[in-house]
Image (tube, rainbow, N blue to C red):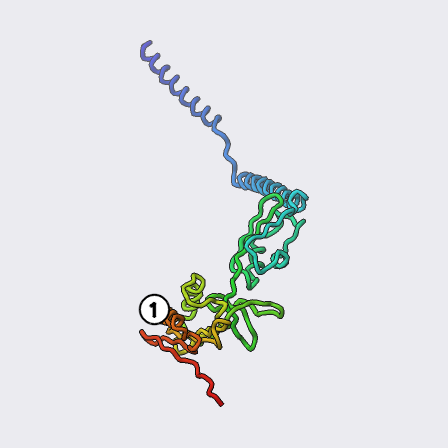
Amino acid sequence: MSTLTMGKQSRLSLSNKRRSNKLNRKQRSPRRLTGTGQFIVRIIMGLLTLSLIAVLGVGLLYGYRLMTSHPYFELKEIHITGNDRLSHGDILDNADVALGLNCMEMNVGEVERKLSANPWINSVTVRRDLPNRLYITVQEKVPAFWTRKNDNLYFADAKGSVIAPMNPGELASLPILSVADGLAEGPQVLTGILQKIKDGQTPFTQSQAAWIKLTSAHEMEIYLDGHDMGNGLTIKLSTDRWEVQLERLKVVWRDLMRRNEFMNAAIIAASGDKIWIKKRTLPTAG
């Protein structure tokens, strides 16, 4: 009897303990926020985030205004390199920069854009060296010819591309260029012959060339004038074989000089693999 009673008491005790543990767990578990509470928390967190962003924005704006107005960042040195035709003043005026401007406030890309608009500038790089230095490096276009356009003279580069109009008072010893429309090989031929002249691989110099023509017949005509050219000499080469023909022309040129007949030549023309010479017409005795 006593043993049975003890077993029942033990089971009752275990059952009570389990119930007690369940109640304790329920009491310990945190209360979850309802939908309204979560919404309020989100609003508060959002307002705090916006406040932080606003504070940072104001701080950055204040810092920017401080840097762009502080004398520490005022330009004290402007270094310009690579210019030959354009003066320092021309470049500064085109760039719209001057000593005293704030280095931080200046837009380097805008300065490069303004300088690139100048027809004489081929390329430009602008670099600022904080706190107060600016470096401008330009590469100018080099004129190789004069060319006519609408009855006006323009400077042109080695490819025959127009650079800028010639202003009154500008002096240069350049040949006049004339290129027929639609001549695709024109730029390549021009740069090639100019390089040959520069390298001393022609029997004449660029200063002796009065004009150069690229005709619709795919011929290059060069008129030479000078004290050692007599009354002038015209050279004709094919635009497709001008390099080979130039080498043969040099042989004929030397032969004419050796025989003292050079001054009698009015035209030296290449046709295929041959070189032709047209002599001057001597005046007849009256």
Identify which residue is drawn at 49% across, 30% down. Answer: 30
Q: Position of residue 24 (x, y in %)?
A: 46, 24
Amino acid bearing label 1 = Val
From the image, tell me which residue sits under label 1. 244
Q: Is residue 119 left or right of residue 284?
A: right
Of residue 139 and residue 144, the one placed in the foreground of this image is: 144
Where does residue 15 sit, x and y in percent of width and height? 38, 20
Identified at 52% across, 65% down, the residue is 143
Q: Is residue 216 above or below residue 190?
A: below
Q: Nearer the viewer, residue 161 or 247?
A: 247
Identify the residue at horizontal 42%, vertical 67% (top origin): 203
Does residue 179 appear in this view? no
Quarter the N terminus occupies: top left
Q: Quadrant of residue 57?
A: top right
Q: Kindly state the secondary structure of the residue where label 1 is placed.
A: helix
| Residue 189 seen in the current view | yes
Residue 281 in the image: above or below residue 81: below
- Mark 1: few/some/many CA within 10 Å (<14, 14-19, 20+): some
- Quick one: 206 or 48, which is closer to the camera? 206
Q: Residue furthest bottom?
A: 286
Is residue 231 rendered to the left or right of residue 48?
Answer: left
Picture coordinates of residue 200 (x, y %)? 43, 62
